[in-house]
Amino acid sequence: MTRKIVEAARGWIGTPYLHQASHKGIGTDCLGLLRGVWREVRGQEPEEVPPYTRDWAEPQQEEVLWHAAARYLQRVDMTDQAPGDVLLFRMRAGGIAKHVGIAATTGKQPTFIHAYSGHAVVESPLSAPWARRIVARFRFQLED
């Protein structure tokens, strides 16, 4: 099952970054990538995503992304690492979790797939600067 998630995510590599979009090959942001992978491995999205700004939920310090992940994904221990894990990142200390990626490989040279402003969907090394920003790991529940 994890292979299916990683393969689906890798299929988005090269898709340009486009805020609020979720269209393979056309444009996506980090949440749109996760939504697109969901559609490929699970089917219809469980809820409609309302429009959001680049600073969404920051003024109120609401963990909107974290709570949404917890509704539809299974939270796993940070040390229980597997390909296909959904990674939540805090981009700055004291900020909310507002970036998401999908673990592609684990082990000595881990990688993850994500979309971020100014880049297309890429598979990046999960280097120390990225790894220290991870605040939660979740897994797709492929069986209902």
Image (spheres, rainbow, N blue to C red):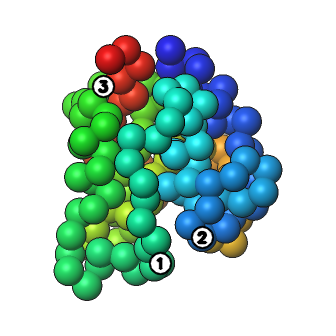
Q: Amino acid at mark 3?
A: Asp
Cα separation, mark 1 vs mark 3, equals: 31 Å
For mark 2, does the 10 Å Cα neighbourhood hold few (<14), some (14 to 19), or many (20 or more) residues?
A: some
Above or below residue 109? Residue 132 is below
Residue 80: numbered disc: 3
The residue at the point 24 percent across, 42 percent down is 70
Q: Which three-letter amino acid code belongs to the residue tagged 1? A: Arg
Identify which residue, 131 or 18, lies in the foreground: 18
Residue assigned mark 2: 19
Q: Secondary structure at mark 3?
A: loop
**Residues tagged 1 and 2 counted as in contact (Cβ below 8 A):** yes
Instruction: Kindly give the residue lying farthest to the bottom in the view shown.
Output: 59
Q: Is 65 rendered above or below residue 53? A: above
Question: Which badge, 1 or 3, comes first in the chain's sequence?
Answer: 1
Position of 134 with respect to 126 (left or right) is left
Q: How many marks?
A: 3
Instruction: Provide the residue designation for mark 1.
Output: 54
Residue lying at 23% horizontally and 63% vertically, measured from the top left: 63
**Three-letter amino acid code at the position of disc 2:** His
